[in-house]
Every structure is written in C-alpha cells, then in structure tokens.
Image: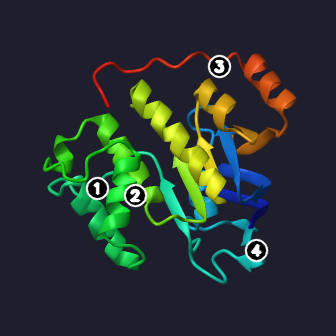
C-alpha cells in the first residue's frame, strides 16, 4: 500500500496553510509529523484524509486519486484535535453508533478496541463524565476498531498517564505490524524514539526536512533537544 502526496497546497483566507507538500508513505510504517502549533499538521491530516479540498496537487492511494475516485480515504481511522462524542452516551454506546455507519464490525470488535486502550466496555458512565485521558483513549479506540488500512493520530499520547502512554504506543506498534500506514503528530521525544520509521519536520505549512534512518532520527532528537514529557497525575 502506498499513499503518494504530490505537491499539494491549500490557502485559507489568503494564508497558505499547506505549501507544495510531497510525501511517499507506505503500509507497515509509522510516520511522525513534527512541528510547532499552527504549522499545519492538523490541516495536513485533513487534506490527506479527504476531509478538506485542495487548491492544487494530488493525493493518490495505490493509483486511485483522492476526491476523484473516492471522496475520502476508504479505510481510515482518524483522531483530530478536540474530538467530541455524544455526551450522554457511554463509551461503548458511542462506538456502537459510529460502527453502525459502515456496518463492518459488531459488538465483539468494539469491546476489543475499548479493552485495547485500557477502558472497560461495561463502564456505565456517560461520556461527559470521562476524564480527558479517558476521552483520549476512547477517541483512539474509535480510530482502530475497524482495523483500517490508514491511521492518523493527532497527539495520541496527549492527556495520558504513564500507563496510558505505554499502552497506546504498544497499540500503535501492533497496528504497524498488522500492516497499517500510520501518521502521528507529536511533540513527545519518546514517541519519536520508539515509534518513528520516518520524521517529517513541518514549519509554516511546508515540509522542512525528512529523516528515515536511525542515525537521522537520533540526530533530529539531539538537534531539537525535545524535552521529556510531563505526565499528568490525575488523568487516565
């Protein structure tokens, strides 16, 4: 599986948020998008998934052109910033509702996805009672529950405690082993060190640099002096 990004650009309100970006991405790999807030990481995910139109350039999945042959990527799990599910449904009920939209999975697959992120599928609490960490775990569960070919995760370890961070990293590596193409946006150096097969450094809507070897990734971490994450004590 190959996702080819060819010279894509997007301008919103006279500001160029994506500027001539090209990438070649493959299944069974984890790619990290690294850059400061506002550099365009979330907009890039929207563009690659088909959730946003482009001014120019193409995104091609195995010779099929996005927004021409299909409107959005056909097998995609995605977590973008500020995920909000139904406040008065339980975690299981939320995922059950979303699963019904495609009809690809049943109750057992939903339960398995919830367990994989460290939540209880039998938990009777409704979503609005969840902590930030629980909401983050549930968002990731919805992204992986249908075993999609492509997974995009915006700051996947955000708001998680140490157990949650370790569990989500393990899950990402399991999905990579399954053959999924995985894109994550993160500022966490350990996410980069443990997960990345390649790093795209993004700045002002452009890809500034790309590293895909152990030495290059180690050099990137050293040069950027990314600080150790601070884990919350009261979230899960």
Q: Is residue 211 visible?
A: yes
The residue that mark 2 highlights is 142
Establish if 232 lies above or below 67. Answer: above
Q: Earlier in the sequence, mark 2 or mark 4?
A: 4
Q: Position of residue 218 (x, y in %)?
A: 79, 24
Q: Residue 85 got which mark?
A: 1
**Mark 1 / mark 3, whichever is N-terminal:** 1
What element does badge 1 sit on?
loop
218 to 210, vertically: above or below: above
Residue in view at x 26 percent, y 47 percent: 120
Seen in the picture, residue 10 relative to 163 is either above or below; the reply is below
- Residue picked out by circle 3: 226
Q: In x, y percent, where is residue 167? A: 46, 37
Q: Could you give the CA–CA distance between mark 2 and mark 3, rounded to whole angstroms? A: 29 Å
Measure how far apart labels 2 and 1 are at the Cα level.
10 Å
Q: Residue at x 58, y 49 (%)?
A: 174
In the picture shown, does residue 155 fall above or below 110? above
CA distance separating discs 2 and 4:
25 Å
Alpha carbon distance from label 4 to label 3: 35 Å
Residue 10 placement: quadrant? bottom right
């Amino acid at each position: 599986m190959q996702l080819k990004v060819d010279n894509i650009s997007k301008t919103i309100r006279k500001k160029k948020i994506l500027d001539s970006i090209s990438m070649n991405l493959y299944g069974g790999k984890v790619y990290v998008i690294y850059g400061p807030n506002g550099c365009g990481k979330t907009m890039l995910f929207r563009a690659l998934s088909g959730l946003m139109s482009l001014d120019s350039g193409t995104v091609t999945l195995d010779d099929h052109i996005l927004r021409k042959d299909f409107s959005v990527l056909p097998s995609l799990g995605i977590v973008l910033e500020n995920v909000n599910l139904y406040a008065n449904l339980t975690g299981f009920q939320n995922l059950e509702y979303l699963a019904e939209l495609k009809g690809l999975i049943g109750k057992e697959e939903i339960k398995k996805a919830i367990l994989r992120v460290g939540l209880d599928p039998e938990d009777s609490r409704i979503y609005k009672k969840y902590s930030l960490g629980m909401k983050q775990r549930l968002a990731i569960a919805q992204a992986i529950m249908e075993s999609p070919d492509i997974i995009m995760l915006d700051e996947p370890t955000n708001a998680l405690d140490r157990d949650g961070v370790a569990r989500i990293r393990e899950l990402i590596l399991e999905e990579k082993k399954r053959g999924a193409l995985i894109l994550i946006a993160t500022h966490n150096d350990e996410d980069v060190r443990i997960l990345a097969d390649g790093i795209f450094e993004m700045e002002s809507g452009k890809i500034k640099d790309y590293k895909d070897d152990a030495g290059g990734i180690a050099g990137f971490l050293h040069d950027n002096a990314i600080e150790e994450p601070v884990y919350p004590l009261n979230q899960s």
